[in-house]
Image (cartoon, grey):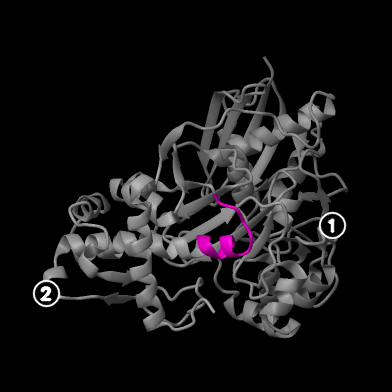
């Protein structure tokens, strides 16, 4: 039996899964936290947890990897796939030494820098045409602009930029002259075009103020190289792309991720035409595309309602299920932190439909669930409106197990809903990529067809007869949204 390993180097920990190369069955696991202060807390609007460090020594990732691999976890593996937190920036000098600690994804200091870059290129539409995404504070392109503005001496020393997964792959390979990345992680930088599948080095230069070397972009099944011990290292990818690959998401599938903020993404055969930048055009880990729509308000809406009613998320769910669809006319527009989809950064939430008979805890509880899910359904409709087919929705996040979410989501999202069993799908996706690269190198697999590992177990929920009821709830929600924010969706 051959085995491969997948590494998930997140913002807080390293997890390793060792899988059977042919079946994908997990045979061993390893785990270790990063040796960093902080962690925990509610996620911020970028989907990252507030309170986590915004910068770190990249060596901490290697220390965590070593701890996770202790006790022979990697013994006998033939290939390793690396996935890591997205939107980190490791800036290297001419000798390959970091000029400063790595800037990680939850760093919000670059908000002004991102806005500067939008103006510098001529607005949202110009960026959407150039790279399929409008700069956001988390992206490496905005971090480069921030570095140039706030740490000019360090910025002048930057000769090359990598992301966390790129840096880890380079370290595992023994720091060779060649540095690599994959199309998935490259697509989130703000200076790689998903449409042309090529670097926009001019945009990295626009951000930093001088030219910078960018890593070679590998195809999904290409190996990055071999370790000094002879282990194959696959191309690697970002955590979002690895999770989609681990779940087995394909054409016709969408993923709705329930963090404090939310995201909706789907596998698509091409880059959707979207001139406003509402859709972020990422690439996936298989050669396809991964258009993403973000919302700023998901589980934070439920937590706010639970605190208001003096209960827990579980208690809120129980309350909500004693109400009826439509929440007795109560509608919650969940824009508690402003909103990104629709683009209403300075707005606030709205509670509409208050009547004496609707002023009951159970109706407010259900309105919170319906408002959150209607907001995510709006994001899903943005993808559908650009030709993305959605027949099945994977629902991720701890809140996906709440009975009220499971009961309400299928009808409001208008599709079959799958709630996968808990697992580290990011590490599993990295392991699957390693098995693919290993198989191609041995002539056993095609570079166009990944290994056919079994789909993850999960609960399948059908909208059934509730679909018409869900459409009525969404219409009630849309009426309030349009009355409050006319033309929010054009």
Q: Which of these two is toward me, 352 or 159?
A: 352
Q: Are marks 1 and 2 in contact (CB under 8 Å)?
A: no
Magenta residues, start to end: 380-390
Q: Residues within 10 Å of mark 2 (few under 14, many from 20)?
A: few
| Comparing labels 1 and 2, the label whose residue is closer to the camera | 2
Measuring 43% from the left and 76% from the top, which residue is drawn there? 338
Residue 229 in view in this figure: no
User: Where residue 467 sits: x, y (%)?
Assistant: 38, 52
Q: Residues within 10 Å of mark 1 (few under 14, many from 20)?
A: few
Q: As displayed, is residue 435 above or below residue 251?
A: above
**Image quarter of the N terminus:** top right
Q: Quarter-wise, where is residue 285 in the image?
A: top right
Q: Is residue 385 magenta?
A: yes
User: Where residue 321 sits: x, y (%)?
Assistant: 22, 51
Kind of element beneath mark 2: helix
Measuring 60% from the left and 38% from the top, which residue is drawn there? 248
Kind of element beneath mark 1: loop
Image position of 385 (left or right of 234):
left
Marks 1 and 2, how far apart at CA: 70 Å
Please tell me how many numbered marks the rendered image carries: 2
Question: Dot 1 corresponds to which residue?
Answer: 95
Image position of 367 (left or right of 454):
left
Precedes in sequence: disc 1 or disc 2: 1
User: Where residue 23 sits: x, y (%)?
Assistant: 62, 22
Q: Quarter-wise, where is residue 360 in the image?
A: bottom left
Q: As displayed, is residue 334 above or below residue 32?
A: below
Q: Which mark is residue 356?
A: 2
Image position of 171 (left or right of 462):
right
Image position of 323 (left or right of 350):
left
Measuring 76% from the left and 36% from the top, which residue is drawn there? 233
């Amino acid at each position: 039996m051959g085995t491969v390993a997948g590494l998930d180097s997140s913002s807080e920990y390293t997890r390793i899964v060792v899988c059977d190369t042919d079946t994908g069955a997990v045979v061993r696991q390893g785990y270790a936290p990063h040796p960093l202060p902080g962690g925990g807390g509610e996620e911020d609007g970028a989907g990252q947890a507030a309170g986590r460090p915004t910068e770190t020594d990249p060596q901490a990732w290697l220390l965590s990897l070593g701890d996770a691999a202790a006790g022979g976890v990697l013994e006998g593996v033939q290939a390793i796939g690396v996935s890591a937190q997205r939107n980190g920036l490791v800036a290297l000098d001419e000798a390959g030494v970091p000029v400063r600690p790595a800037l990680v994804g939850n760093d919000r200091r670059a908000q002004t820098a991102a806005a500067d870059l939008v103006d510098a290129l001529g607005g949202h539409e110009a960026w959407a045409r150039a790279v399929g995404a409008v700069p956001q504070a988390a992206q490496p392109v905005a971090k480069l602009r921030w570095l140039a503005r706030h740490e000019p001496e360090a910025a002048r020393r930057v000769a090359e930029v990598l992301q966390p997964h790129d840096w880890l792959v380079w370290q595992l390979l023994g720091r060779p002259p060649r540095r690599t990345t994959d199309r998935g992680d490259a697509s989130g930088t703000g200076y790689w075009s998903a449409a042309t599948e090529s670097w926009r080095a001019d945009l990295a230069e626009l951000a930093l103020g001088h030219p910078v070397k960018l890593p070679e972009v590998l195809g999904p099944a290409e190996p990055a190289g071999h370790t000094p011990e002879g282990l194959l290292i696959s191309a690697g990818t970002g955590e979002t792309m690895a999770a989609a690959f681990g779940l087995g998401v394909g054409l016709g599938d969408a993923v709705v991720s329930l963090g404090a903020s939310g995201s909706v993404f789907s596998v698509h055969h091409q880059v959707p035409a979207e001139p406003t930048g509402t859709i972020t055009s990422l690439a996936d880990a298989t050669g396809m595309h991964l258009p993403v729509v973000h919302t700023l308000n998901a589980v934070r809406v439920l937590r706010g309602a639970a605190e208001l009613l003096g209960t827990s998320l579980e208690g809120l769910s129980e309350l909500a299920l004693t109400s009826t669809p439509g929440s007795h006319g109560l509608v919650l527009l969940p824009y508690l932190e402003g909103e990104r989809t629709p683009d209403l950064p300075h707005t606030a939430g709205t509670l509409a439909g208050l009547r004496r008979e609707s002023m009951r805890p159970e109706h407010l509880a259900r309105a919170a669930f319906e408002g959150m899910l209607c907001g995510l359904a709006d994001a899903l409709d943005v993808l559908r409106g650009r030709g993305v087919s959605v027949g099945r929705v994977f629902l991720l996040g701890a809140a996906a197990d709440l009975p009220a979410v499971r009961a309400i989501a299928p009808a409001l999202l208008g599709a079959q809903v799958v709630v996968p069993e808990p697992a580290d799908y990011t590490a599993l996706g990295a392991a699957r990529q390693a098995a693919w690269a290993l198989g191609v190198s041995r002539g056993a697999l095609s570079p166009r067809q990944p290994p056919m590992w079994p789909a993850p177990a999960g609960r399948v929920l059908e909208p059934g007869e509730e679909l018409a009821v869900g459409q009525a709830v969404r219409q009630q929600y849309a009426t309030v949204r349009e009355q409050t924010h006319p033309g929010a969706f054009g």
